[in-house]
Image: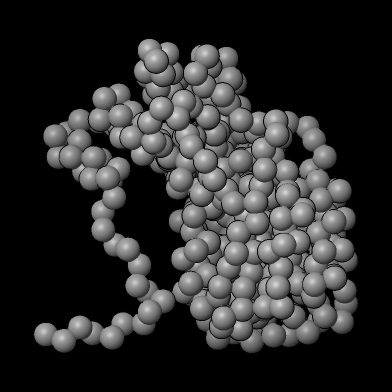
Amino acid sequence: MDKFPFARRTNWQQETNALNKALEELEARRIPVMDLTVSNPTSCGFVYPQGMLSALNALDNFRYHPDACGMKAARAAVANYYAGQKTILSPDEIILTASTSEAYSFLMRLLVNPGEKVLIPKPSYPLFQFLLEINDVNFDYYPLVYDGQWRLDRQALERCVDAKTRAIILVNPNNPTGSYISHDDLDFLNEFCHKHHMAIISDEVFFDYALTNGDFVSLAGNKRALTFTLGGLSKTLGLPQMKCAWILASGPQAILKESLSRLEIIADTYLSVNTPVQNALGEWLGHVPALQAQIMARVKENWQWLSAHLNDHTQLLSLDGGWYATLRIPAIKSEEEWALEFLREDHVSVYPGYFFDFDREAYIVLSLLAPVNIFQEAAGRIMRRLAKI
């Protein structure tokens, strides 16, 4: 049979990697694995108020009121949530989407022609490559460097720009490094983007989860450069299955107005956010403090335990926020060899650093979301193995 001519943008490597093969082998032998890669809060034992589901019972859910940018009451609920954080936004500058991944796709369609590029951080979230390739967008990495704290390499960032660069993506705080954008960074980025006629996309899904007190700044409402700040229920409320996220648009008024006009048409093409969740959004966002308190308590306890149980062969890298911790371990083996050893010998699953494009070895990344007893046992096994070196 002749090979079918699928689109080149979907020519991904689809072979099962060594770590997934090892996991499958353990599952086949019915050997339980302690998962320190967990990212789904609904599988981590947090308690969600049962009354939240009653918000889905509204009779108005049987009526369809399509609004390209999302129902006005739902957008007002998001604006009210940010007002509680002393950020004043207009509902007319908010666009609802079904996920932050969809928000990225909308923004690529708005900002970038095929063959043009955006800048993405390294190390950071590995899904960016897929999101950009699906949208026929090229990309280049700009480095985050570590000297006791993570920081933008501004000179390297300047070298990444060319005539086809249209936007920079920030993750604030970055995943997995947990580093925030500072006020000084924002001043630099605003000037940088103004000079190069670029937009800023700031992914702030983890912004509420600060572990330290620092010079952290959200880009929500940033008016000095065209800016799109992303958030959503997946992290803000620990409800990824409810499929609701948002784009907060800001910037100089003339270009902002044109951006919103074009985004409205893009969003109207999909109308992807379901009515019941939009109707429930106002009530659900009222539960944010209680649910985030549970998640923060878990993350802090695991982070503090890990900090107290390091040995001479492990270094916990600086962390200001988010749900992940990065450990530097001896490079006497590759990251994949270490991760396979932890999996096969200790029955603990971790992320190797290359998953996030760390530029050297050896790093592993641990999720701090796991239940405390599981985290301490699993991380303890890793520490005991490393102590034997």
Residue 298 can be seen in this image: no
Q: How many numbered tags mark residues here?
A: 0
Corner quadrant of residue 8: bottom left
Check the image and tell me how it is coloured.
Answer: one colour
Quadrant into which the C terminus falls: top left
Corner quadrant of residue 94: bottom right
- Residue, x 55% and y 33% (percent of image)? 325
- Residue, x 39% and y 36% (percent of image)? 334
Percent x, y of residue 28: 14, 40
- Toward the left, the furthest residue is 1
Residue 144 can be seen in this image: yes
121 or 252: nearer the eye?
Answer: 121
Question: In the displayed structure, would residue 327 be above or below residue 17?
Answer: above
301 or 193: nearer the eye?
Answer: 193
- Residue, x 61% and y 78% (percent of image)? 116
Quadrant into which the N terminus falls: bottom left
Percent x, y of residue 217: 80, 48
Question: In the displayed structure, would residue 243 be above or below residue 235?
Answer: below
Q: Is residue 161 left or right of residue 381?
A: right
Percent x, y of residue 357: 51, 49
Q: Is residue 169 left or right of residue 243?
A: right
- Residue, x 50% and y 48% (percent of image)? 356
Question: In the displayed structure, would residue 298 be above or below residue 228?
Answer: above
Q: Is residue 283 left or right of residue 330?
A: right
